[in-house]
Every structure is written in structure tokens, then in C-alpha cells.
Amino acid sequence: MPLSSTNTHQNGACADCGLHHQCVCSHLPKFELPAHIALLMHENELTRETNTGQWLLKAISSTSLHIWQRKQPCPKLLAMINDPAYCAYLLFPNDESIALSDAYHHAEQTSSSKTPLFIVLDGTWQEAKKMWQKSPWLQVLPSVHLLPQQQSSYQLRRNQQQGHLCTIEVGSCIVEELGFAVQAQQLNDFFQHYMRAFQADKSGHALKAKTRL
């Protein structure tokens, strides 16, 4: 799909997806969830063009972005955590974490009026651990973990550790474990297309259409 004249920067890149040779924005699914996903982003992610959390924010209406600070909690996120309308969980696997799907179903049964709030640490695994270790306000939250059915297919960064998912893959797993398999697959399909288009863009051309034999 060519870039539209109303959605480009002066350098020719799409203002939304950042690609020069092929816009992927029309491929992104958009939907709602009966839960809120809050991305707590390490400041380094703000300048990484390989960040995938941006797509969750654009795809799912019930998402929000918060920037982590070492010396103090994020005021807006802290307000959401303390809001009685939400039931907050930190997505961070550890010895005390429970399956996200179990936490969601428990919240449905015990506090139907509250919206589950899943806080996702958006950064490298090393940065995520630092964010957790230096944030006592996060450590007191009940923690949950995912039960992914497959390994990460993320290819946009080097030295990815086995078993770790990128942010959009985490989001897709959350969507699936909440019972929205179709929407999760749509996110996965978009992500696969985006990675191919991103790699082609960095090589200086649009993604070539697949030919059938």
C-alpha cells in the first residue's frame, strides 16, 4: 500500500508507522477489551524504532502509556492503581505470580464491578527487572504471568533471550488469555506483516508481494 499524501512527514515516512516505502497502518486491527492494559515504558524505548508497544496503544482502545521514573511513581498510573474502579495486577513472572487467566476469572467472580488493570513493563528484560527492583510501589501489587503457547518470533533486535516475548506479543497473549482468540490472531498476523515490511523498508524497498506457484 503506498503512503497517502495526508499521512506523511516531509522525509516521506508515514507519520504513524514510520515506514518510508510501504504504510502498514491499514493492516492494524482495532478493538476493545473488558480490561485495561497500561504500558509502563522505560525511557529508552521512546527512541527505539523497534518498539512494538506503540501498536498495542493504537490497536486496543483500553490501553494507556506511562513513562517509568526511577525516583518517583508515575502519577497517572498510580492514580489508576488506587482507583476503586480498577483491580490492578503487575505482569511480571516470579515465584509468587499466578496465571493471568486465573487472576482475570477470579476478578470477574469476586469484583464484577471492577475493571482488571494489567501493567506491562515495556523495555528490554534487563530494563524491566531494573524497573521492578527500583519501584517498591510495583512490588506490592499482585503479580501475574502468561502461559504462551509458542516461542517469540520477534526479529527486530539482536541478542533476544529465548522465552522472552516482545511487547506486542505480550499484548496478544493477554488478549488470547482473556478469551479473545480472534483478536489475538489478528494482532499476531499484523505483527508478522509489520516485521517483514520493517525489514524491507530498512533495505530500501517496499515489501514484495508473495507470488503463487
Image (cartoon, rainbow, N blue to C red):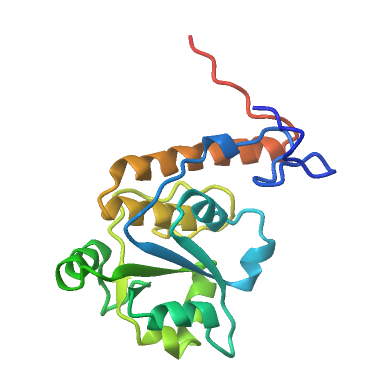
Q: Is residue 43 above or below residue 188?
A: below
**Residue at 27% in and 65% down:** 100
Query: What residue sits 62% from the left and 53% below the top?
Result: 50
Q: Quadrant of residue 146?
A: bottom left
Picture layout, residue 176 above or below residue 87? above
Residue at left 37%, top 50%? 151
Residue 37 placement: quadrant: bottom left
Foreground of the two, 195 or 1: 1
Q: Measured from the top left, where is residue 189 in percent x and y?
A: 44, 37
Q: Is residue 199 above or below residue 175?
A: above
Percent across and percent down for residue 58 are 53, 51
Find the residue positioned furthest to the right.
10
Can you name the residue that lies furthest to the top here?
Answer: 213
Q: Who's the residue at 72% across and 30% down the image?
A: 205
Q: Quadrant of residue 107?
A: bottom left
Counting from the top left corner in percent of width and height, residue 197 is at 61, 36
**In this picture, is 76 found above or below 59?**
below
Quadrant where the image shows the N terminus: top right
Q: Is residue 196 visible?
A: no
Asked if residue 146 shows in the view, the reply is yes
- In front: 183, or 160? 183
Which of these two is toward me, 55 or 31? 31
Residue 192 percent location from the top left of the image = 49, 39
100 sits left or right of 126 in the view: left
